[in-house]
Image (tube, helix red, strand yellow):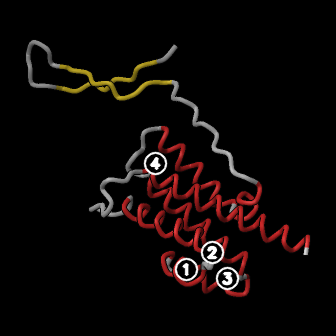
């Protein structure tokens, strides 16, 4: 069962003074659960929270704001990642623009490249004119996913190298 929600519009037609337009339906679809591996969840709980909120906004059709949220989540992920590697530089990293952090502070080329591209697409979500008109939110999410993947793999690799050597 579902409920249709209509808005009444007043029109200047004496035979039919009201018209109705479909505004939405209830119940809304429950957002699908995006899963995050333990490494990412521990590294950046705020990233996970912001990303999930953005996904919820997207599923509710809030397409003008969800991309901004995804871009924000990326910034939290990258800065939390960098702070975890350089805790003594925390204040410097947090104040620095994201693009500069990626350029100057990420040494792994896979993480650096994916984060840079995701930032470019994420910035398109915040500006009036898009630079990458052939790309969309799905591309942004894939780049964020690739960034997450490489951060997780770097962490796993480093952990095993430390434990086994």
Between the residue at mark 2 and the residue at mark 3, the CA separation in whole angstroms equals 19 Å
| Residue 83 lies in quadrant | bottom right
Instruction: Residue under label 3, please give it.
Output: 90
Between the residue at mark 4 and the residue at mark 2, the CA separation in whole angstroms equals 24 Å
Q: Please report whichever mark, 2 or 3, sits nearer to the chain's N-terminal start.
A: 3
For residue 78, side relative to residue 21 (left or right)? right
Q: Please report whichever mark, 4 or 2, sits nearer to the chain's N-terminal start.
A: 2
Question: Is label 1 in contact with label 3 (beta carbons under 8 Å)?
Answer: no
Instruction: Residue under label 2, please give it.
Output: 108
Dot 2: what SS?
A: loop
Between the residue at mark 4 and the residue at mark 3, the CA separation in whole angstroms equals 31 Å
Q: Front-most of 67 and 53?
A: 67
Dot 4: what SS?
A: helix
Between the residue at mark 2 and the residue at mark 1, the CA separation in whole angstroms equals 13 Å
What number is the disc on residue 141? none
Badge nearest the viewer, 2 or 3:
2
Residue at x 72%, y 78% (from the top left corner): 85
Label 4 Cα crowd, 10 Å radius (few <14 / some 14-19 / many 20+): few
Percent across and percent down for residue 158 are 79, 71
Total marks shown come to: 4
Q: Please report whichever mark, 2 or 1, sits nearer to the chain's N-terminal start.
A: 1
Between the residue at mark 1 and the residue at mark 3, the CA separation in whole angstroms equals 12 Å
What number is the disc on residue 101? 1
Residue 11 to residue 133: above or below: above
Instruction: Residue under label 4, please give it.
Output: 138
Badge nearest the viewer, 1 or 3:
1
């Amino acid at each position: 069962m579902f409920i249709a929600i209509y808005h009444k519009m007043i029109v200047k037609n004496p035979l039919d003074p009201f018209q109705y337009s479909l505004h939405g339906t209830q119940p809304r679809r429950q957002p699908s659960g995006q899963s995050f591996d333990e490494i990412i969840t521990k590294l950046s709980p705020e990233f996970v929270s912001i990303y999930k909120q953005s996904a919820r906004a997207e599923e509710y059709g809030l397409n003008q704001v969800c991309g901004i949220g995804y871009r924000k989540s990326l910034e939290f992920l990258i800065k939390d990642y960098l702070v975890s590697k350089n805790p003594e530089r925390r204040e410097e990293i947090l104040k620095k623009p994201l693009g500069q952090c990626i350029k100057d502070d990420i040494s792994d080329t896979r993480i650096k490249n994916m984060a840079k591209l995701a930032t470019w697409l994420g910035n398109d979500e915040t500006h009036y004119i898009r630079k990458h008109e052939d790309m969309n939110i799905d591309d942004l999410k894939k780049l964020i996913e690739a960034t997450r993947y490489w951060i997780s793999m770097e962490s796993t690799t480093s952990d095993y190298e430390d434990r086994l050597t």
